[in-house]
Image (cartoon, rainbow, N blue to C red):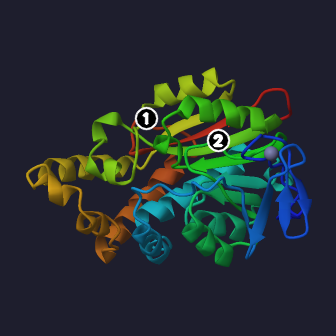
């Protein structure tokens, strides 16, 4: 379809999966007759089940406040940009579409560093409202728990810390492979090491954390050629293990509380500065090597058949 409805995005009807056509202030489906409105710049491509009831929207505001400074978000955005530039040789000729864009801090950073955006989607209207203020790209509200309403032909898709939320991660990877044009590229990040899984993951609605080998197998089974797959955030593994051991002594009700989650989002200046410096060193190391451990994994996978 064109239009955002005039975005030129390849989008399908969430009801019948027919390619949509753009109209004035809406997109419509020629097969089933459904009409999807554009409301304040956001195309609402949902059947009415946006958002997960057990996710606390309180965190959108928290994220919005800490994302620019918190070591975890800073390290992630820097390694994502560097990986894109290093692994996608014709990056300047591709437009990135992000699935599950959250509050948009990462997209704002990428866009500010010259990465062209095709658009983004998320299942939360609250988060897209934040994204709308940060980047000028077509935004699409989608249903949680369904495949995103993407048509074929994308050249660069990104999925940052989304796959671990899905029951059917294999189905999503197959779908993304088929949504890419030949030579199209998927860049993704996921939380790593199943032995680190704890209440923080439960609070964040994670179904799992990944082993690197498991992610490689799932990507290859979906049809992808894996170009890069490395752990990062290695300096966080020892403190995470220590925190896990210590908080294990506290009541489970506290471990699952909002107070605990807020604590993790606090920016403590000295600790934050130290971890930012350490993770900056790690990023330089990753220019030439890959890491067998680290609390996250970043991957680059391509659909065969096109130029690199
Ligand atoms: Zn339809």
Q: Is residue 119 in sight in this rendering?
A: yes
- The reply to whether callout 2 and callout 1 are in contact (CB within 8 Å) is no
Q: Which residue is mark 2?
A: 147
In the picture shown, does residue 42 fall above or below 153?
A: below
Q: Is residue 227 left or right of residue 180?
A: left
Residue sitting at 48 percent across and 25 percent down?
Answer: 213
Residue placed most toward the observer, 111 or 263: 263
Image location of residue 98, percent across then percent down:
67, 54
Q: Residues within 10 Å of mark 1 (few under 14, many from 20)?
A: many
Q: Which mark is residue 278?
A: none
Q: Secondary structure at mark 1?
A: loop
Q: Which residue is mark 1?
A: 210
Q: Quadrant of ligand 1?
A: top right
- Where does the C terminus fall, quadrant-wise? top right
Q: Residues within 10 Å of mark 2 (few under 14, many from 20)?
A: some
In the picture shown, does residue 269 fall above or below 27?
A: below
Residue sitting at 24 percent across and 68 percent down?
Answer: 259
User: Of discs 2 and 1, which sits in the foreground?
Assistant: 2
């Amino acid at each position: 379809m064109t239009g955002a409805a005039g975005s030129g995005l390849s989008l399908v009807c969430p009801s019948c999966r027919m390619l949509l056509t753009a109209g004035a202030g809406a997109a419509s489906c020629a097969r089933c007759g459904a009409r999807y409105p554009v409301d304040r710049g956001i195309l609402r491509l949902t059947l009415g089940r946006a958002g997960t009831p057990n996710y606390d929207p309180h965190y959108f505001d928290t994220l919005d406040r800490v994302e620019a400074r918190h070591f975890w978000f800073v390290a992630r955005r820097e390694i994502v940009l560097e990986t894109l530039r290093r692994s996608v040789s014709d990056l300047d000729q591709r437009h990135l579409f992000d699935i599950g864009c959250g509050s948009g801090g990462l997209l704002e950073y990428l866009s500010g560093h010259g990465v062209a955006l095709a658009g983004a989607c998320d299942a939360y209207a609250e988060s897209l409202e934040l994204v709308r203020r940060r980047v000028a790209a077509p935004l699409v509200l989608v249903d949680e728990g369904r495949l995103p309403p993407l048509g074929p032909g994308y050249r660069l898709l990104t999925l940052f810390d989304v796959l671990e939320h899905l029951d059917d991660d294999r189905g999503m990877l197959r779908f993304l492979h088929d949504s890419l044009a030949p030579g199209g590229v998927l860049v993704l990040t996921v939380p790593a090491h199943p032995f680190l899984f704890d209440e923080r993951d439960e609070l964040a609605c994670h179904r799992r954390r990944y082993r690197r080998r498991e992610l490689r197998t799932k990507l290859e089974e979906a049809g992808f050629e894996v170009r890069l797959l490395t752990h990062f955030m290695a300096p966080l593994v020892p403190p995470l293990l220590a925190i896990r051991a210590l908080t294990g002594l506290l009541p489970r009700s506290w471990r699952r509380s909002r107070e605990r989650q807020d604590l993790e989002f606090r920016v403590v200046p000295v600790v934050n500065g130290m971890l930012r410096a350490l993770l900056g060193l790690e990023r330089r190391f990753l220019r030439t090597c890959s890491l067998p451990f680290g609390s996250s994994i970043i991957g680059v996978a391509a659909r065969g058949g096109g130029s690199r």
